[in-house]
Image: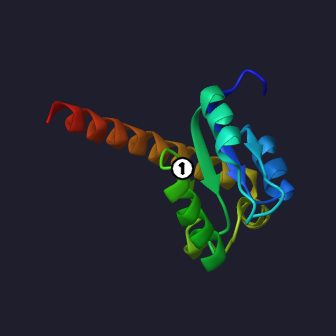
Amino acid sequence: PKEGGEYLVVTKSLKDVMCLYSCGITAIAPISENCFLNESQYERLKKKFKKVIIFFDNDLAGINNMNKFRKTFPNIYPIWIPRKYNAKDISDFYKHYGREKTLNLIEQAKKLIDAEEIRRCTEETSKTIV
């Protein structure tokens, strides 16, 4: 949406974007997993969305790419589907577990992201006090 919002998920494929949109989550995908947002694109999105989340596959390449982008953009929130679910991405999870469990997983992820935001804010506050 042009007006922005609480969460924006950057994922690796159009299939995952469509799955997330069907669950009420705003999402985008770059051209490829290796071609991420540049700094000016990220800054524009950060002004519109309170939390920018990176959500790539839970395989080694996906985790490595999320770590690389997290170093470039330290305010981004990396998430992935735990391997115990045998789903590499959100569209696989949806296909295996259905809409209700996918919505539950998204709610769990939101709670983790919100808790991480509080932790980061507390950490920043303690740095300014010391």
> Which quadrant holds the N terminus?
top right
Residue under numbered circle 1? 73
Q: Nearer the viewer, residue 99 or 18?
A: 18
Judged left or right of residue 64, residue 74 is left
Give the class, few, some or many, for how many residues have Cα within 10 Å of label 1's Cα (few <14, many ≥20): some
Way the structure is coloured? rainbow
Residue 24 image position (x, y, % from top left): 74, 37
Residue 26 image position (x, y, % from top left): 73, 38
Q: How many marks?
A: 1
x 64%, y 44%: residue = 39
x 77%, y 46%: residue = 28
Please, which residue is most extreme toward the left here? 130
- 5 shown above or below 15: above
x 71%, y 65%: residue = 89
> Which quadrant holds the C terminus?
top left
| Residue 23 visible in this rendered orientation of the protein | no
Q: Nearer the viewer, residue 53 or 68?
A: 68
Please, which residue is most extreme toward the bottom here? 60
* Among the 4 quarters of the image, the one containing residue 63: bottom right
Judged left or right of residue 73, residue 65 is right
* Among the 4 quarters of the image, the one containing residue 43: top right
Residue 13 image position (x, y, % from top left): 81, 59
| Residue 45 visible in this rendered orientation of the protein | yes
Query: Which amino acid type is marked by label 1?
Result: Phe
| Secondary structure of residue under mark 1 | loop
x 60%, y 47%: residue = 53
- 37 shown above or below 60: above
Residue 102 image position (x, y, % from top left): 68, 53
